Image (cartoon, rainbow, N blue to C red):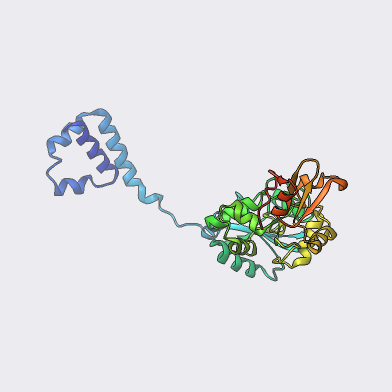
Amino acid sequence: MDRNESKQYLNQIRTGEADEEASRSEDVSRSDAEQLEACADSREEAAFMKRMAAASPKLKMTAPDGIEEEVMIRISDRYDVIDTDFGPAHVGFTPRGISAVKLDVEEDGSFESYYKERLGRIVVRGSLPEKFARAVRRTIKGEKTGKPPVTLEGLTEFEKTVLEHLARIPAGEVRPYAWLAREVGRPKAIRAVGTVMARNPVPFLMPCHRLVPSTGGVGNYYYGPEMKWILLEREGIARKDLAGWKQRGVRFIGSRTTGIYCYPTCRNARRIQQQHRMEFSSPDEAAENGCRPCKYCRPLSL
């Protein structure tokens, strides 16, 4: 018996197949077994494996009551209910971040059903980490929180791409739906972008309230336009400014000193002194007045 055959025989002893294999095969002869016995290391390991095989039935046991439920809780997504300025909020989360935020939920079962349908995973009640609760509350109050602690698992690649680009719109600024469609490389998919906003599982943190119609105003919002107005005002955008720009047909603001035009809420537009401000209704009008687009807000043609 060579080294490989000895190893194979030891493996058969580990699995309890040695006797059966020997009875139905002539590959392991008596002389082979004697050679194996002659090797001290192999003999010791073979004896150990036989003792383990004899003791293995004693290791079997019945799982404790409730273990299945406990395992499901540990591997499942969880949710909690927290108080916010807009009332109770159901917040779904995983170890990787916040996965869902929903207001106006009448009962836990409704949120659990929504979560399963929207993200394809079971969610059970748990304790929301304080840093997640703080992020939701601060965002709703209009306070800056840095990178939102969210996870987009369960969404399509298109939805993930749209929401990731949406998150780049700074607090206190808005962009049109067409702008976001262009940013994700799908300039004709304006309606699809709007659908992603309507189905956004993590509103506030993924700020769909910062997306507005190209014609001005605030447009629609899942929780109603009034809440959208409030969120934007808390971030520093005056309601009268948005309403005024829409009424006057203003889409862009240009500077006589820098020759740059921006979206009206762009940080660069806000720096323009009143006597140097120019209002435009289109990129063509801005170009006719010698202005070029801002590299920060990247305005596009309507």
From the viewer's perspective, tell me whether residue 293 is left or right of residue 250. Answer: left
Note whether 247 is above or below 283 in the view shown: below
Q: Position of residue 140 (x, y in %)?
A: 76, 56
Residue drawn where x is 51% and y is 57% of the image: 64
Residue drawn where x is 72% and y is 65% of the image: 219
Q: Residue furthest right?
A: 275
From the viewer's perspective, tell me whether residue 99 is left or right of residue 237. Answer: left
Q: Looking at the image, which is closer to me, 90 or 31?
A: 90
Q: Position of residue 120 (x, y in %)?
A: 53, 62
Q: Position of residue 34 (x, y in %)?
A: 16, 34
From the viewer's perspective, tell me whether residue 272 is left or right of residue 119. Answer: right
Quadrant the N terminus occupies? top left
Can the viewer see residue 266?
yes
Note whether 133 is above or below 215 in the view shown: above
Residue drawn where x is 68% and y is 70% of the image: 107
Q: Looking at the image, which is closer to me, 109 or 223?
A: 223
Q: Quadrant of residue 13?
A: top left
Count up the numbered dots. 0
Q: Position of residue 289 (x, y in %)?
A: 75, 48
Can the viewer see residue 100?
no
Q: Residue furthest front?
A: 288
Quadrant the C terminus occupies? bottom right
From the viewer's perspective, tell me whether residue 254 is left or right of residue 114. Answer: right
